[in-house]
Amino acid sequence: MRCIIPGVALLWCVRALPGLLIAVLVTGATARAATAGPQARAAAINVVAAAHGSSLLGLMVKHDALPDEQEGAEAGGLAAPNGAPAYGGRSAVVLDLRTGRELLRDAIPTDTVQFWMALCPAGRLAAIVTGRRWLTDEGSWSEHRLHTWDLSRHQQLFWRTPAPFLGGHGVVRVGDMKWSRQGDHLAFTIVGSPCFVPSTSGLYVMKPDGSSGFRELPVKLHEDNWAWSPTEDVIYALEYAPYAGFRVCRVTLDGEAPKAIWRPQGEPAKAFRETWLPSPGVSPDGRWLIVQTEELDWQENTALGVAALQAVRTDGSGSVPLGSWTPVPQQHQPRGEEGRMYHRARVQVAWSSDGSTLYALVSTDEKSSQLYCWKPGEWLSAATGPELPFPSAVLAGLPGSSEMLVWPFPEPKSTERHGALTVNADGRTRLIPSAAEAQSFVKENQFATVDDAGHLITIAGKRGDQSVRALDLRTGKSTHVYP
């Protein structure tokens, strides 16, 4: 997920949904390790980094008052125009969900406009990018700094402005940032935006302490479509080249040329075909990669974005089509040139934590969705799950099982909220916490993550007085975690 907070507002980007890498636009940042630190009442809490099935959670917290937020920046924060950090009352916190203790706290200076965080549960590592941007007579410029932390030792490993951050674009930012499976490498993309048209310029990799330098991998990314393998230090990336079309490549870290493992069928350079790698699309055993495509079907003045899924074998031995869906045209007044309208089917995917089942939530209208379940080895006889009364949701696998948590995501046009639920591979569902309380529970809580103990972690309360709580999905008992 990706958060953009100009002030306090939150924007959820569904395509980038769990994996998870977060981008936040805030009002400032300076990094400092914390053990237990003073914890005042939290006026507002936003989730900025999470990995389902982990004990780590990244938060943006606004406290009523924290004395040490007014201290200087021991770890080297971005300076305000007058040279001294000015703090805006917010902190970025890495939380240990097992104990409720802060493993890291970032005080946020007011001149920081961008903040990204990525967490590695295996190595208990954190990577943070802070950025500032300003206008000059020569155009718009940006500066970013990268911080990496060993959370288990409360030690900063790396802090400076890496050379790849010093691009020649008028506006440069860091795109996706992800740790490898054991935290041996950190990979990130650099996105240049000349004329404010995003374009990915490169994929880089480094060691946590920066000792290996920054190596650009030999791959031409299509936007931020890439993912680490969960079983080896290999990256799967979606490339695009004019007149050649799309292809999915296996990229190693030894400098070898990428190896193509999948190409879409048909004419390679079709202008109306879009392709991307949904997140998280790699199966836990590393054997399957999910690819989503979309092609336009014109019906009079209406363009229908037909969505399709492919399960690609990561060894390059082939792929299996999982299904395709055509959206239902909605009744809207024509707009744009010649009154043309565009409708698309929305697809969200997630693997169960045990790797036995792939779940896909598909919406072809604005009111409901269908949940599909596939099992590797049974691709051609896919089981269909229940129809759900909401068009989109967060999907999170429950640790050590084939069950999936489905948390309804509020739509701007929605007039009714529905309860969260769990579903198994046979399509059986169970409301959380119960049928009588399910709808009110979703109204009073914001989804955060599912921890390694199988607890549902939520942000409870209204802005002005919020807290992190854990719900035991087996007993229904809710406990306070933070602050």
Image (cartoon, rainbow, N blue to C red):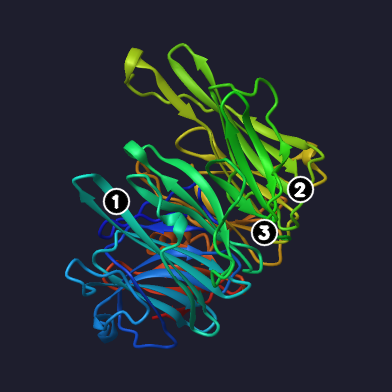
**Residue drawn 52% across and 59% down?**
435
Instruction: Work out whether mark 3 precedes mark 1 in sequence or the reverse, and give the earlier one.
Output: 1
Query: Is 85 on the left-hand or right-hand side of 274?
Result: left
Query: Is 462 on the left-hand or right-hand side of 14?
Result: left
Residue type of the residue flagged with mark 2: Lys
Which corner quadrant of the image does residue 244 belong to?
A: top right
In the picture shown, does residue 222 fall above or below 68? Answer: above
Mark 3, residue position: 403
User: From the viewer's perspective, is the residue at label 3 or at label 2 nearer?
Assistant: 2
Q: CA distance from mark 2 to mark 1?
A: 49 Å
- In the rendered image, residue 357, in percent from the top left (x then y), is placed at 72, 52
Q: CA distance from mark 3 to mark 2?
A: 13 Å
- In the rendered image, residue 289, in percent from the top left (x then y), is placed at 69, 46
- In the rendered image, residue 362, in percent from the top left (x then y), is placed at 57, 39
**Residue drawn 50% across and 39% down?**
368
Instruction: Work out whether mark 3 precedes mark 2 in sequence or the reverse, and give the earlier one.
Output: 2
Q: How many numbered dots are placed on residues in this image? A: 3
- Element class at badge 3: loop
Mark 2, residue position: 375
In the picture shown, does residue 8 fall above or below 94? Answer: above
